[in-house]
Amino acid sequence: MEKFWLHRYAILLSVCTLFLVVAGASVTSKEAGLSVPDWPLSYGQVMPEMTGGVFFEHGHRMVATAVGFMTIVLAVWLARVETRRWMKILGFAALGGVIFQGLLGGLTVKLLLPPAVSVSHACLAQLFFSTTVVIAVFTSKNWLSGPEIVEDHGWPSLRSLAIVTPVMVLAQIALGAAFRHRAIGVLPHVLFSMVVTLAVLLIATFVMHQFPEHRALSTAAKALLGVTFLQVMLGVAAYYTRLQAAQQPLAMVLTTVAHVATGGLTMASSVILSIQILRNVRAHGALHAHQAVTS
């Protein structure tokens, strides 16, 4: 029963972490949409007409504090009840990640949003969110019931795509963060999005074609495909509203925040699918070889 509640708590933490990502994106987007000549400003250097930015920043800090406390509870809980040593390590790794994230957030404010620190802060936030999601997966009943081994019979191998795809999604997130913080133009982000979308289409299509009856694999593949499609649509909307930011500042903020949040869901979905592939899929011929040796 305690592990049942541990799983529910991990889900709650992942939801709160996604809300934290939304809050952080709201701060950045709100300041980006303000018509001030010296944007970005420090969160402490706010003009009277920028009270909306102050509101978002205070909300962001409150959510960050709550998530930090919840992560401490999760790490202690995992250390106390988990029999899997690697899960205990993962819990403390998540705690270390949220502490480092807080330090990066402080540097972002103190150093007036330098692009390198701000982009690192954005990427680590998405990585931390993915970590909370995988902890929720690892504590679920379906995961604890064991793998359902199948054999890969396509090319390129699913295990190779499983390693490459999340890295590509993270790189795309970094390019998007760099664009939002005005470190680069939008073209690298747009061009690489096509490459990432193709990689997602490949891995998801291969999984659904080869293993349509495998519940864990097909569900993860469908989720990644759906979230990626939504992310592409939001990306187009975010860019269009950014071009119209002077006339529609609220639309720009809302679409950008939604795009960032869905980026986090895309990252987490790609990680989950990759984990399921590495757990359940064996290379072509490996399963038969193993069965021959053990028989």
Image: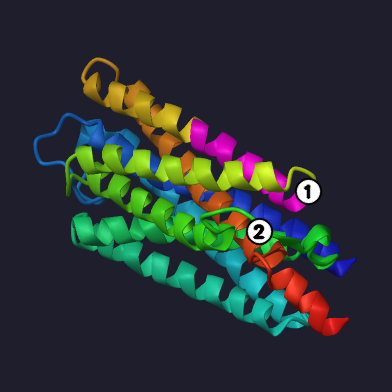
What label does residue 240 carry, if any? none
Left or right: 188 in relation to 26: left
Nearest the viewer among 201 and 96 is: 201
Q: Which residue is mark 1?
A: 215
Q: Residue at x 10, y 41 (%)?
A: 38
Q: Magenta stretch: give its range.
A: 216-229
Amino acid type shown at disc 1: Arg
Question: In the rendered view, does 128 fall on the left or right side of 243?
Answer: right
Q: Which mark is residue 152?
A: 2
Horizontal and vertical percent position of residue 230: 51, 31
> Which is more toward the observer, 290 or 190?
290
Circle 2: is it few (<14), some (14-19), or many (20+) Cα within 10 Å? many
* Distance of label 2 from label 1 (alpha carbons): 16 Å
Q: Looking at this view, is 270 or 77 the one in front?
A: 270
The relative height of residue 32 versus residue 199 in the rendered view (above or below) is: above
> What percent of the width, then of the height, locates residue 201?
51, 40
Q: Quadrant of the N terminus?
A: bottom right
Q: Is 35 left, or right, of 149 in this rendering?
A: left
Q: At 36% from the left edge and 54% from the top edge, which residue is drawn?
A: 122
Q: How many marks on residues?
A: 2
